[in-house]
Image (cartoon, helix red, strand yellow):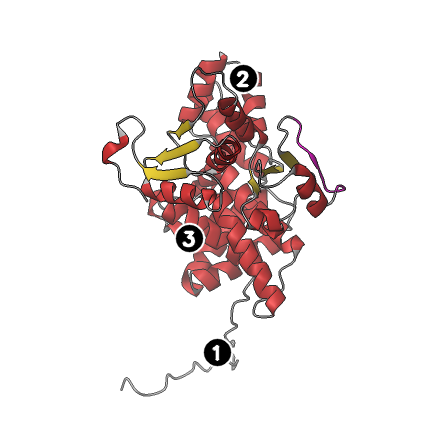
Amino acid sequence: MTDQPRRRSPHAPNRPGKPYRRPQKDPVRILAFEALRAVDERDAYANLVLPPLLRKARESAEAGSGPRFDSRDAALATELVYGTLRHQGTYDAIIAECVDRPLREVDPPVLDVLSLGAHQLLGTRIPTHAAVSASVELARVVLGDGRAKFVNAVLRKIATHDLDGWLERVAPPYDEDPEEHLGVRHSHPRWVVSALWDALGGGSAGMEELLAADNERPEVTLVARPGRSTPGELLAAVGEQTAEPGRWSPYAVRLTEGGEPGALEAVRDGRAGVQDEGSQLVALALANAPLEGDDRRWLDGCAGPGGKAAMLAALAAERAAERLAAEQQPHRARLVAGALAGNPGPYQVIAADGTRPPGGAGGL
């Protein structure tokens, strides 16, 4: 009868069943996973997704409604997100060698957990056992126990070699396919390697140096938006021992020891923001370009996601100029509108194709 208890073999040990252990929730890795999911599912920008998640975790911890989350946790979460994304191409090639199916058939959330684990194993100083254990616990929380076993098996395969060892296995020989070799080793799409090769005239050493430099962890740079904040205010808020003025932009402040920009009042208010100096210089070059006629109407024809747009809006406001920001994709146009919120002076944001007359485009 099917409802009778199963008889134990007389030779089987009389051991009680192992009690179920609930997975441990690690707020840092859960946050990193949520950021990667947003980038994948919504085509979101990591630099726009991550700060609100960090701020929410910090505020929850301070209010006592969430687990502890301090500056070290924020730094680790930031490294996990940006490091995983910077080296995604390389990690994909390695993971593909460790699974029994094409990578496109692996569920994206599972692949995100595997990528986070691969980065901890191959791109950080986190000990191997801790990297695997933490990733499996994350998988149990966000994927379930069944798929966590798959994650455990794959990560244990990845842990058998260091990054250099894996690159020897997954990157094709340079002599056979130099572009694919460089792309895999330096986590760049083949088309990017090809474009750089054509632009710079080839040469293995020069390309290696360029691609390696492109993967360097960038410094966090703030912009004091003209007329709304000053570099002095930001330096005072951050502390001159952990920040310094920018090298090229008069509005830049470099955070020399990292930090959490979202904790600064000026950043929360939109009077300052996170923006690389190169991006700041592009906005300044446009604003200072010589022109004939009245300097009263400015057009930003490709405004998303809004970093340069916000700086241009602040510069235009100082000159009492009207500013029109156009972005073809509506969701990116909404990002621009958010970046410009609170900016003084007349401006408008529309969803429009910059290559066509905007008369028929609808405003936001």
Q: Mark 2 points at which residue?
A: 204
Q: Residue 173 at what x, y percent from top left?
A: 48, 24
Q: Residue extending furthest left?
A: 360
Q: Which of the two labelled residues, at mark 3 and mark 2, occupies the earlier sequence position?
A: 3
Left or right of 219 on screen, residue 5: left
Number of residues whose C-alpha sits closer than 10 Å to that of mark 2, classed few (under 14), some (14–19) or many (20 or more): few
Q: How far apart are marks 1 and 3 (CA)?
A: 37 Å
Q: Residue 66 at what x, y percent from top left?
A: 57, 67
What residue span does the magenta drawing correspond to?
240-247
Q: Mark 1 points at which residue?
A: 12
Q: Residue extending furthest top?
A: 201
Left or right of 133 on screen, residue 199: left
Q: Which of the two labelled residues, at mark 2 and mark 1, occupies the earlier sequence position?
A: 1
Is residue 344 among the parts visible in the rendering? yes
Left or right of 31 on screen, residue 246: right
Task: Look at the image and tell me in which quarter the C terminus lies.
Answer: top left
Q: Residue at x 51, y 49 (%)?
A: 50
Mark 1 belongs to which amino acid? Ala
Q: Is mark 1 on a helix, strand or loop?
A: loop
Q: In the rendered structure, are the residues bearing label 3 and label 2 in contact, judged by CB atoms less than 8 Å apart? A: no
Q: How would you classify the magenta stretch by its main secondary structure? A: loop
Q: What element carries label 3?
A: helix
Q: Residue 93 at what x, y percent from top left?
A: 45, 37
Report if residue 244 lies within the magenta region.
Answer: yes
The mark lying in front, picked from 2 and 1, is: 2
Task: Look at the image and tell me in which quarter the N terminus lies.
Answer: bottom left
Q: In the rendered structure, are the residues bearing label 1 and label 3 in contact, judged by CB atoms less than 8 Å apart? A: no
Position of residue 265 relative to residue 303, above or below, is: below
Mark 3 belongs to which amino acid? Val
Q: Residue at x 26, y 28 (%)?
A: 357
Q: Name the residue under label 3.
A: 110
Number of residues whose C-alpha sits closer than 10 Å to that of mark 3, classed few (under 14), some (14–19) or many (20 or more): some
